[in-house]
Amino acid sequence: MRLGAGVRLPANLGEEEPAWARMRAWAERLPDGTIFTGTTAAEAYGLWLRPDRPDRPVEISVPSGVRVRRPQIDVTRHRLPPHSHGVDGVRIATVAETVLAAARRLSLLDLVVLIDGVLHEQACTREHLEQLTRGRRGGPRLREALALADGRSESPWESLLRVLHLVCGVPVEPQAELFDETGGFVARADLLIIGTRTLQEYDGAVHRDRAQYARDRRRDSRLGGARYVRHGYVAPDVRFRAAMILREADEALGRPYDPTRLDAWYALWRGSLWERAPRSSQDGPGAEPAYGPH
């Protein structure tokens, strides 16, 4: 596959990840001091980033005096290079620097999901990311995203569901431990609406497995016996039926449904990679990118 003038991706990648093969092919044609960063590095690290168009520009950082003029390359020039490390001939920014670079180009919602995944996987600490918000390009947007981020989310769609509740003024506790009236442990919930016994959960593709389905029904029985009310949502619910989700949350809180609360959510959703991603045959109940484990 031709990536650019003089740059080709081998037809047979074997076991090599396409993102790394793509960077390796470009590294051979780019100047010394090139560091792969931003969404290119995020994809290589396997971070929570919604797949975008296959011709998304390759993001690199180069020394301030270096010129790179290729339509397939998105260049940032640096006086002091971002922290990075070399992997088999490819120099890639650290995870923290990757997130900072992504903050310059991603929407706020995309960035929050990305940070949730980084914190959940403990790829770097919140404190490290907070340090990068001071005096760095992308710092203000990164600070804004950190205020919404929570590493307790266990998948990208769960992050989206959490943020939907958060910006609509629904107080939730992620990964809440639930107990019955005798103090016995019942289950752990994706989201517990604080002050209620209502759970808002994301049902990913794994829940369609027959064995998992049986475990889910036994769990539902325990929850019902402990007087918890569970609402399960799938990807199309988050994408197209946010009003339904908010209405059920408002009912749990005993407050009138107010659709204007969704304005903040739609402002985040519109223009994000999640909103722009085309609907596919895989975008059925519980559809999610391969990295969504939950």
Image (cartoon, rainbow, N blue to C red):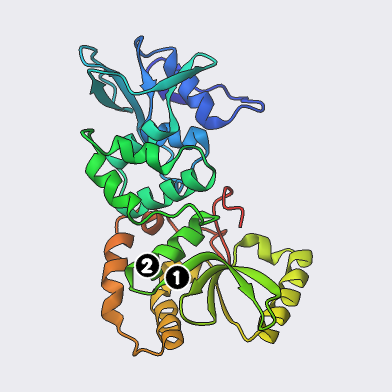
The picture places residue 173, in percent across and down from the top left corner, at 48, 67
Q: Say which quarter of the image contains residue 278.
A: bottom left
Q: Secondary structure at mark 1?
A: strand
Q: Residue at 44% of width from left, 61% of height from top?
A: 160
**Of the pair 6 and 28, the residue shown nearer to us:** 28
Q: Secondary structure at mark 2?
A: helix
The picture places residue 92, in percent across and down from the top left corner, at 44, 23
Residue of label 1: 172
Badge number at residue 166: 2
Q: Say which quarter of the image contains residue 183.
A: bottom right
**Of the pair 232 and 11, the residue shown nearer to us:** 232
Q: Residue at 22% of width from left, 34% of height from top?
A: 137
**Of the pair 249 and 69, the residue shown nearer to us:** 249
Q: Residues within 10 Å of mark 1 (few under 14, many from 20)?
A: many
Whether residue 76 is visible: yes
* Vertical relation: 50 (above or below) 171: above
* Vertical relation: 37 (above or below) 290: above
Under mark 2, the amino acid is Leu
Q: Residue at 44% of width from left, 33% of height from top?
A: 95
